[in-house]
Image: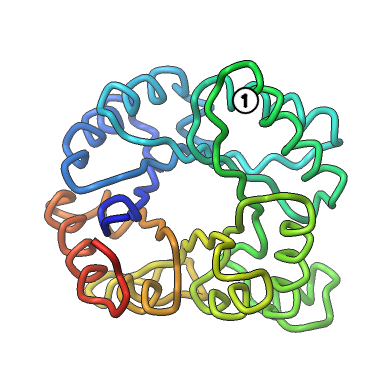
Amino acid sequence: MSPKERLIVAMDILDKRQCLDMIGFLSPAVGYFKVGIAPFTAFGEELLRAVAAAGKKVFLDLKFHDIPNTVKNAAYAAAKRNIQMLNFHCSGGEAMLQAARDGALLAAKEGAPKPLLIGVTVLTSMDKEDLRKSGWAGSVEEKVKELALIASRSGMDGVVASPLEIGMIKETCGRDFIVVTPGIRPEWADGDDQKRITTPAEAIRAGADYIVVGRPIIAAKDPLEAAKRIVEEMESSVGCGT
């Protein structure tokens, strides 16, 4: 994949016109657009159509977490919409993740392309203290490893994890196990509410398959230029294919 194909822009924009315009504006420098819960709830149908019309891929970031049958139906419905990537909370357990996989495979049997199925480990806004408050006594890395193994055993294609855990995940689950990495902040951008972060170049060097970037691009004075700068940083990384 080229660096551009590995860049996912998070479209966390609630103004419909601004969001739809941004898709067309950024398309020359972007492979994927991440459609999260806020814009999807507000105007999801139009947003999905706009990404498809631009010839780009959709990462449907709804982080499904429910009983297995409900998640199976959600995965089936998403796959039927020609979504290229979607995710599920690993904390939902193996039965739920396996049901998600079954739903996507059922849609594939009916002719839909199978999306990449991605498990969510520990949100990049959380650190060890946040996990402790939620009842986990171990380290962030231990929790990510545990959840990544659950995803691998359940037939997921990969996980979402911070750039700090990429190497451990690849070592534990195999080099072909996909890591989608949020928490990306170029040196010229603010860290805001993200806690476990690295630069685009550092994430690619660590082995990230895809990086997710939101505010450093969409809140920039010139979003297209910001996206191009990030792609250039990715290209400069060791082992980043073109």
Q: Secondary structure at mark 1?
A: helix
Q: Is residue 23 left or right of residue 181?
A: left
Q: Is residue 58 left or right of residue 169?
A: left
Residue 86: percent from the left, percent from the top?
Answer: 57, 40
List the residue tagged with mark 1.
Answer: 108
Residue shown at the point (36%, 79%) measured from the top left: 202
- Where is 29 relative to 160, above or below? above
Quadrant placement of the N terminus: bottom left
Q: Nearer the viewer, residue 155 or 99?
A: 155
Residue 172: percent from the left, percent from the top?
Answer: 68, 76
Residue 152 lies in what quarter of the image?
Answer: bottom right
Q: Amino acid at mark 1?
A: Ala
Q: Nearer the viewer, residue 165 or 36?
A: 165
Residue 34: percent from the left, percent from the top?
Answer: 43, 42
Quadrant placement of the C terminus: bottom left
Residue 74: percent from the left, percent from the top?
Answer: 69, 27
